[in-house]
Amino acid sequence: MSLKLRLVALTIVVIAFGASCTKGNTKPSYKFRAATEDGVAVKVGDITISKKELMKGLETDLYDIEQKEFDLKFNKANSLIIEKLMDKDPKKKGLTNDEYMEKHIVSKIEISANDINNFVKEKNIPAAQVNPQIKERIKQYLMVEKKKDALDEWLAQKTKSTPIEIFFTKPRRPSFDVKVGNAPTIGDENAKVEVVEFSDFQCPFCSKAAVILKQLKQKYGKKVKIAFKQYPLPFHAQAKGAAMAALCANDQKTEYFWKMHDAMFENQAKLAIADLKETAKRIGVDTAKFNKCLDSQQTLAAVEADIKQGQEIGVKSTPTFFVNGQLIQGAQPIEVFSEIIDAELK
């Protein structure tokens, strides 16, 4: 058989196969209509699904999507503003945007050896890993960050008398009813603002969140109450043991919980059971009671209750915060928290 005939025969087989597979295969019928005023989102016959029922469990995912859309618009707007402001500057004549930035905005930026050493210290990079290649990578990273800061300063100066007006809205943070229960807390019990953190002692991002909590305590004092919920992630082998240890310390005194909290986040390489017992001894707990509590997994039920609560309100990663119920995901800068806290205090 010729190639042409073989192709014709193959086409016939494919068509026949497709026809036999699709025969009798029906799909559900969907009719998309304008939203109703009665709170119904989906209806089939006498079955109805309310908008509230539909949204439950999707709040965090939908907010993430809305936030990504906002960030895309905001970043594009910023870029366009910068380009147009550069074009208006007489000093831009004959220069590309990159050339203008290098000459008039970031020309004085330098990265010193001290800057690199401070970065190494801040990030707890082991001395054995600090070689010329690592130092060069750190230098390049710091250079990018300083250029961003310089560009922000330039933009702030250019718009000092004419604020940037944005005509698209920021997504509204989803809000949840988060019960503190018996979680360890710090701050005034009757504070107007309550920050609840779901965290994992083995999570590197959560150690950054511990620094943020300290900043919040320093800035707001007793105006804010902070509660800590256990949310050990399943792929962190030592996280659940650390969570139980923290609550064992809390069983003796809340002060011991926060000391244990600080010690574990300061050295996340020391989360084995023997290390936890040594840390507890160092902070002054009754070691016999603590060791018995940890060995018998006395606080496991409390840890699992926190995990269940987190799952029910949409916690998907650590750290996750709720500021008077409003969601903040990740170790965000203190300014993100302050925006909500200041509004709540007013």
Image: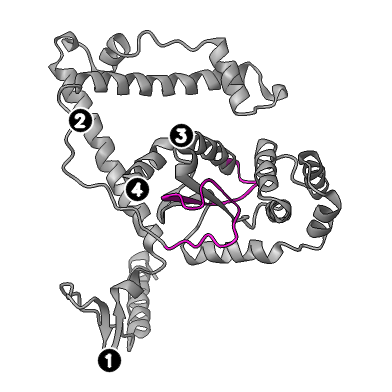
- Residue 256: numbered disc: none
Mark closer to the chain start, 1 or 3: 1
Which residue position is annotated with label 2?
80
- Which one is in front, 346 or 115? 346
Colour scheme of the picture = one colour
Q: Quadrant of the N terminus?
A: bottom left
**309 lies left or right of 41:** right
Amino acid under label 4? Answer: Glu
Q: Which residue lies furthest to the right in this view?
A: 288
- Residue 46: numbered disc: 1
Q: Distance between the residues labelled 4 and 3?
A: 15 Å
Q: Give the percent coordinates (x, y) of residue 187.
A: 53, 45
Q: Give the range drawn in magenta.
A: 177-204
Which residue position is annotated with label 4?
344
Q: Give the percent coordinates (x, y) of residue 173.
A: 34, 53
Task: Report helix, strand or loop for mark 4.
Answer: helix
Q: Does the magenta stretch include residue 37?
A: no
Amino acid under label 3? Answer: Lys
Res 168 → quadrant: top left
Q: Residues within 10 Å of mark 4 (few under 14, many from 20)?
A: few
Task: Report helix, strand or loop for mark 3.
Answer: helix
Task: Report helix, strand or loop for mark 1.
Answer: loop
**208 lies left or right of 151:** right
Of tags 4 and 1, the one toward the viewer is 4
